[in-house]
Every structure is written in structure tokens, then in C-alpha cells.
Amino acid sequence: MKFLKRIPILIFISFISLCALFFVIPLYVQPGESEVTAAPADTKKPEITAKDHKIPITAYSQNDPAWSGYLYGGLDPMNAYGCGPTALAIAVSSLTDTPFTPVDAAKWSEENGCYSPGSGSAHALIPTGAASHGLHVEKLAQLTPDAFCDALSFDKLLILLMGPGDFSDSGHFIVAYGYDENGNILVADPASKERSDIHWPAETLISQLSTWAHDGGPVWALSRL
């Protein structure tokens, strides 16, 4: 009899338990729905396009008072026509132990048929002048940002012959000597400190390269033998 008296109590307790489960479960996961969780933090590391690399150079300027008035070929002032000899002097002085100023380069050019009256320098000045001073010279065949950075990472200075654009209205030699962490190119412009201070996108330089270069141009890669 005592057991029979307890049956209603047990039924009541079971009913209460079922109700509790019915109302508690939906607080977590509703049937047919996925559990909502916080979006995971973005752990993807930023892509690094290039590590910076810089070749130590002797940065000559054709506007230096020490030689800006020197008459290249006896006719043309260095500050207006001396980008070729100055670029060559930067490369030779930076990659060898031989002191070689823009005037030295201009005289070599005059003596070896690379001076062009009223125009500056023949394109042959770069490969023949560099080779005659103990450097290895090669044409940069692929004109791409990766090719620029690859050559520079092996400590090869690049001499670029620029066409019309940011650097010249006609033709102008500059030297590339490194790149920053974003792959922008560091240049030494013989005619402009302001342009030399800019880190240039490789694509900009490539788009403004001379289209009429010869003797291995418009980009020569120079390195130690």
C-alpha cells in the first residue's frame, strides 16, 4: 500500500524532470540547427613579397661641384651630359677596390669611342667600360620585378637605361642597388638626389625603360668576377 501511495509522487517527479529537459536543451542546440560559435581569429600571416637587400655603393652625382663643370669630350658639361660616366663610376667604385670618379669614367669614354657629342654616351659605354675595369657584365634578359630582385640579391648592380618618363625626356642612365621589404627598387640617379631618395616600384621602372637600347641594354647586370 505504501508503494501505491508513492506512485503519484514518482509520476509527478518524472513529469517535472521531463519538463526541465524540454526547456533546458533548446538553450544549447535546437534540433536541426548547428551550434553557433564565435568566428575564429584570422591566424593567416601576411605574405612577404621580399626581404630587403642593399648593396653598399659609392653614390656619385654628376652635379657634384668637383666635376659638374668638366667638359665631357671637351664640349659637353658633365652636369648635363654625364649620367653615363657617373653611372659607370658608381658601379666600378662600388664593386672594385679601384677609385674611379665620374671624370675618370668620362676620360675613359672619350679615349675608347663611347662619347657621343651633344648626346652624352654611347650605350656601349656600360658593358665595355665595366668589363675593362674587371667586372662581369651580362644582359638582364627578363625584365620583370622578380628578375630585378633576383639579380640584386646576388649583389649584382643593375644599370638601367631609362626612356621618357620620370627620369628623362629622352635617355638617362641610373643604377639600381637594392630593394626594400616591399620589393620596391633602390636607385642612385646621377642627376637627382630627390629621385634617388624614392623607393621605386619595379613595374614603374620597367615601364619606363628605353625601347631603343642596344649593346645589351636597357638593363645591364654588373658583378665582381
Image (cartoon, rainbow, N blue to C red):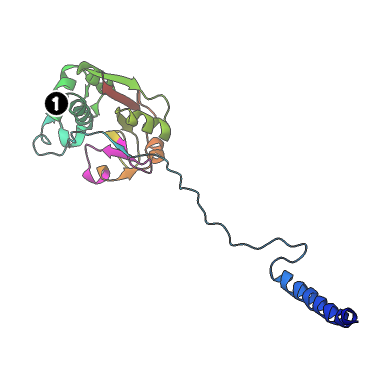
Q: How many marks?
A: 1
In the picture, the quarter occupied by the N terminus is bottom right
SS for tag 1? loop
* Residue 168 in sight from this viewpoint: no
User: Measured from the top left, where is residue 197 in percent x and y?
Assistant: 26, 45
Q: Is residue 194 magenta?
A: yes
- The residue at which mark 1 appears reads as 100
State which quadrant residue 190 falls in: top left
Q: Nearer the viewer, residue 100 or 64?
A: 100
Crowd class of label 1 (few under 14; some 14 to 19; many from 20; radius 10 Å) = some
Q: Is residue 194 above or below residue 132?
A: below
Residue at image point 22% right, 20% down: 129
Amino acid identity at mark 1: Phe
Q: Is residue 93 left or right of residue 154?
A: left
State which quadrant residue 73 falls in: top left
Q: Nearer the viewer, residue 164 or 8?
A: 8
User: Measured from the top left, where is residue 111 in percent x and y?
Assistant: 15, 17
First to last magenta residue range: 178-195
Residue at image point 29% right, 34% down: 176
